[in-house]
Image (cartoon, grey):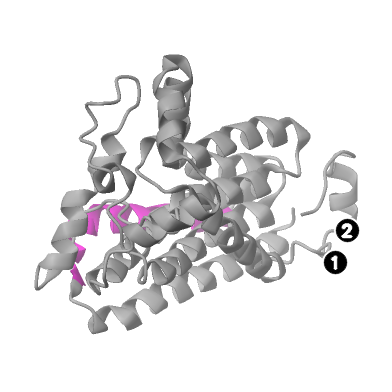
Amino acid sequence: MSTRDLNDIQIRFLASLGVIWAAVLIALPFTKVSIDYESFATVLVLALALAGVGMFAGRYGLDQFRGIATLMAGLFLIMLPMVTANYMAMSLNLPLADELLVRMDEAIGFDWHGFIGFFNERPLLASAFSTAYQSFLVQVALVPMLLLLLGEARRAHAFMIAYGLLTLIAAVVAIWFPAYGTYAHYGYSGAEFANINTYFGFEFIEHFEAVRNNEVFVVSTDAMSGILTFPSVHAGVAYLLIWATWSHIWLRYPFLALNLAMALAAVVNANHYFVDIIASVPLAVLCIVVVRPLFRLGARNSAEPNAASSTEPAHATNM
């Protein structure tokens, strides 16, 4: 990868981050949500410091290190608008959609009680799915770095922007589908499930109720939780991770298995209806459709055709 090519990638990356921030900040005054920027000072300073380290590394031709630093900075910079968008969507306080989501599950023949019972009777399987669910942040941070080290700088940066874009689109869709989720709707406390980690199925409820019921709500490091039910961001990101790792066969199947488990674990461990994880499929596809041309993933960069052809494994595929 040439310095010129990395410059092109990072211009697209930073411009896309700017659009994500702008979308949230423009809509923010029309809601009862505000941001306590002071509480995020450490995160924002760290992001700027990483960006500075990346620029410094670039001056000395350390392009791979520059790419890693910029991706890490981007991960921190995506976090604040991503979380804020969740709270903005739920702050509009539309009627609860749990009954509708139950009917949608029933319409496709999904037996939630039987599904949960199956996992609760199998402790090892339940534990494995809980681990898969909690791998979310590790994967979001690790996969772009792996892709960069494998020479997939465009895909690495494209994944990060797809992640932020998916969160924004999910927040817009979720405006019309606020929900407590399965555990609360069906009247469970969590104690009924001896082998299922239900923490994430209840942890968000305090935040969900606060942003809906309070006259004002301030997003801070003390108020951060995934409060969207339909569609599932966890599942949507799982599908993006499958796409991101698909071009390398030794990454493809481990990440396929892990992320199918992570998507299903949203039902098992995180209070989701099955339709939540189905609804995330078209959102993930839409984000991929957007970032592919944005980061020129469909065609070889004319500045590095020889490098690309000489380094790409024969088994890699373009998706």
Query: Which residue is label 2 attached to?
Result: 305
Q: Is residue 118 above or below residue 66?
A: above
Q: Is residue 38 above or below residue 62?
A: below
* Disc assigned to residue 181: none
- Name the residue: 53% across, 73% down: 15
Tell me where residue 4 sits by quadrant. Answer: bottom right
Q: Horizontal placement of 69 versus 245: left or right?
A: left
**Looking at the image, which residue sits at the far left?**
215
The reply to whether residue 227 is visible in this rendering is yes
Q: Horizontal placement of 258 versus 311: left or right?
A: left
Question: Looking at the picture, how far across and down is residue 134, in whole percent?
Answer: 41, 34
Contact? badges 2 and 1 (CB < 8 Å): yes
Q: Horizontal placement of 293 versus 84: left or right?
A: right
Q: Nearer the viewer, residue 112 or 22?
A: 112
Disc 1 crowd rating (10 Å Cα; few below 14, some 14-19, many 20+) is few
- Magenta segment: 34-59
Query: Which residue is label 1 attached to?
Result: 302
Tell me where residue 178 sits by quadrant. Answer: bottom left
- Name the residue: 21% across, 57% down: 208
Element type at mark 1: loop
Question: Looking at the picture, how far across and down is residue 94, in whole percent?
Answer: 27, 73
Disc 2 crowd rating (10 Å Cα; few below 14, some 14-19, many 20+) is few
Element type at mark 2: helix
Tell whether position 319 is magenta: no
Q: Quadrant of the C terminus?
A: bottom right
- Name the residue: 51% across, 44% down: 110
- Name the residue: 65% across, 30% down: 254
Task: Name the amino acid, label 1.
Answer: Ser
The reply to whether residue 222 is visible in this rendering is no
